[in-house]
Amino acid sequence: MLFGFVTALFASSAVASTSPVREIETVPQQIERRIDEEMYYPAERLGRRETGFVHVSFELDARGMPTKINLAKRSHWPALNGAARATIGRIGPIVGAQAGAQFVAVLQYDKTTADGVLKKKAELAREAARVAKKLKAQAG
């Protein structure tokens, strides 16, 4: 199973937006949903069972498109790192985002069973918060 978790680097980044199709979603919720829709496992690597976490930091521009996409923490597998970066590049536009809003997404590439999804998501949330705090401190 592939999934990601997103955290805002700054509280002001979590702006609510509305959509005629969906109930109100926060900007991080929109990003998580779009990651779920866009995330993929590199086809050429499927037989190798490569797994790992990729931490991707990025900003949203005035149109809600991801910019300044950086790998904050790489997996051991270059193909997974490239897939994570490409996934973030395809998630926009995000409605209601402030220009310059900064986020960290932790993308997990794993064959996780349904029983472990909630536990893994909680672990990802803690890890994303830790990385966001570190990046915020570095930004100063």
Image (cartoon, grey):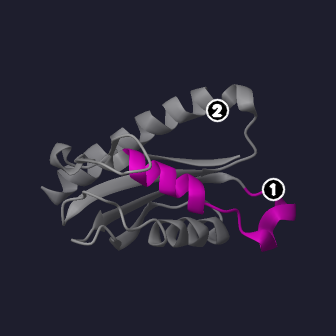
User: Which quadrant of the rendered structure holds the C terminus?
Assistant: bottom left
Report whether 117 appears left or right of 135: right
Residue 114 coordinates in the image, percent (x, y): 73, 31
Label 2 SS? helix
Taking the image as shown, residue 2 lies to the left or right of residue 63, namely: right
Query: Mark 2 is on which residue type?
Result: Val
Q: Residue 82 sits in which quadrant? A: bottom right
Q: Nearer the viewer, mark 1 or mark 2?
A: 2
Asked if residue 54 can be seen in this view, the reply is: no
Q: Any mark on residue 75, and which? A: none
Q: Which three-letter amino acid code belongs to the residue tagged 1?
A: Arg
Q: Secondary structure at mark 1?
A: loop
Residue 83 appears in the picture as rendered: yes
Look at mark 2 in the image and give the residue it sits on: 117
Q: Residue at horizontal 46%, vertical 49%?
A: 32
Q: Which residue is mark 1?
A: 49
Q: Where 134 sits versus 66, above or below?
A: above
Residue 120 vertical position relative to residue 10 in the rendered view, above or below: above
Residue ID at (34%, 64%): 58
Measured as percent of width and height from the top left, residue 57 is found at 36, 61
Residue at 26% x, 58% y is: 102
Q: How many marks?
A: 2
Residue 42 among those drawn in magenta? yes
x and y, in percent, of residue 73 in the image: 46, 58
The majority secondary structure of the magenta stretch comes to helix
Few, some or many residues within 10 Å of mark 1 (<14, 14–19, 20+): few
Q: Is residue 1 magenta?
A: no
Stretch of the chain drawn in magenta? 29-50
Relative image position of residue 131 (x, y in whole percent): 36, 47
Quick one: label 1 or label 2, which is nearer the N terminus?
A: 1
**In the rendered view, would you say 24 is above or below 86?**
above
- Rounded to the nearest angstrom, the CA distance separating label 1 from label 2 is 18 Å
